[in-house]
Image (cartoon, rainbow, N blue to C red):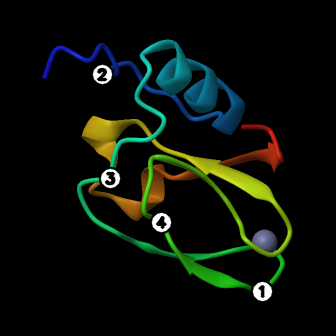
Amino acid sequence: MGCGCHHDLHDGKAIVDHVKRKGKENEKPLVEHQISCQCGTVFTFEKVVMNCPECGMTYAVTPCSSDNIENIKPAGIRYA
Ligand SMILES: [Zn+2]
């Protein structure tokens, strides 16, 4: 895809930084997963960088690995 995200990014903060650097933080993921947040809220993951609507925890995934929910990582409260 030429988006430069084939290296393994396992840290949420690194994913946010990478996706933002590419200007892709508002892209839609390949699949709109349901995220079960640590706070107990379930929300729809509509963008590759998104905050939980309840606690503000930032979740992030690279666009080309966003088909797998396992790749979505928490980055910290309101990190994005
Ligand atoms: Zn939450």
Amino acid bearing label 3: Pro
Vertical placement of residue 16 versus 17, above or below: below
Image position of 68 (left or right of 21): left
Which residue, given by chain and number where applicable, does mark 2 sit on? Answer: 6
Q: Is residue 46 left or right of residue 36?
A: left
Inter-mark Cα distance, 3 to 4: 8 Å
| Secondary structure of residue under mark 2 | loop
Callout 4: helix, strand or loop?
loop
Where does label 1 land, which residue? Answer: 40
Q: CA distance from mark 2 to mark 1?
A: 31 Å
Image quadrant in which you'd find residue 70: bottom left
Image quarter of the C terminus: top right
Residue type highlighted by circle 1:
Gly
Give, as a three-letter code, the residue at label 4: Phe
Whether ligand 1 has any atom under 8 Å from the Cβ at mark 4 is answered as: no
Tell which tag, 2 or 3, sits nearer the viewer: 3
For the residues carrying marks 1 and 3, which lies nearer the camera in this image? 3
Q: Label 4: few (<14), some or many (≥20) within 10 Å?
A: many
Residues tagged 3 and 4 counted as in contact (Cβ below 8 A): yes
Judged by depth in the image, the label closer to the viewer, 2 or 1, is 1
Disc 2 residue type (three-letter):
His
Quarter of the figure that contains the N terminus: top left
Cα distance, mark 2 to mark 3? Answer: 16 Å
For the residue pair 39 and 27, the one nearer the viewer reads as 27
Tag shown at residue 45: 4
Query: How would you rate the neighbour count of disc 1 (Cα within 10 Å): few for under 14, some for 14-19, many for 20 or more?
Result: few
Q: CA distance from mark 1 to mark 3?
A: 22 Å
Q: What is the secondary structure assignment of the residue under circle 1?
A: loop
Q: CA distance from mark 1 to mark 4?
A: 15 Å
